[in-house]
Image: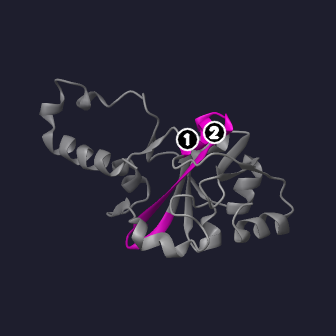
Amino acid sequence: MPVQQLKEFLDKAGTEYVCLSHPPAFTAQELARHVQIAGDQVIKTVIIELDGKMAMLVMPATWRVRWDRLTKILDTDFVQLADEQEFKDSFPDCEVGAMPPFGNLFGMTVYCSEALTTQPDLAFSAGTHTESVHMTTKDFMQLVQPMVISQGFTKPGAQKPAWLIKGRAAHKPDLVQSDRVGSELARF
């Protein structure tokens, strides 16, 4: 059963959803494998610190954060991956790393990758590593009302910018260093 707060919210809204039990999944990609659906339909929930305030990013499990682009699209000077110790108390009754993508239930702004909105259905952790909720994207968007953004994310395998291609990186060392910092933060 999903965490009580999420279950009550979905039931009160009259939302149709399915809850599945599965082996422990500690990443969104593992969840996709366990429930046998495409990674683009599984929500990866990432907690960020945005100008000193916690916020939630939701994106397909197969995508990563592009910190440089996210900073630009959110028009801020400071965005970073939040420390689990700092936000774990914000999600009572949830296992760390299994927070459902309903930041609105936890007093957080939710930023959603536009790529998620193209999926018919979504799955996400239900507050534990062994349970997930499956529902329509339409219902998710209506209940969460996230800010949809089209930049700040990248799908692995996407073509890199020309200046990052081998042999050209030396021409812009300050940008390469900045990108390395972003890629270090993107490992989660």
Separation of marks 1 and 2 at Cα, in angstroms: 6 Å
Q: Quadrant of residue 127?
A: bottom right
User: What segment carries the magenta color?
Assistant: 28-55
Disc 1 is placed on an element classified as helix
- In this rendering, would 141 be left or right of 74? right
Q: Which residue is mark 2?
A: 34
Q: Quadrant of residue 4?
A: bottom right
Q: Amino acid at mark 2?
A: His
Dot 1 and dot 2 residues touching (CB under 8 Å): yes
Q: Please state which of residues 21 and 87 is positioned toward the viewer in this rendering.
A: 21
Residue 74 is situated, as x and y percent measured from the top left of the image, at 43, 58
Q: Residue at label 1? A: 30
Could you tell me which quadrant the N terminus lies in?
A: bottom right
| Mark 1 Cα shell of 10 Å, populated few (<14), some (14-19), many (≥20) | some
Quarter where residue 52 is shown: bottom left
Q: Is residue 115 left or right of residue 87?
A: right
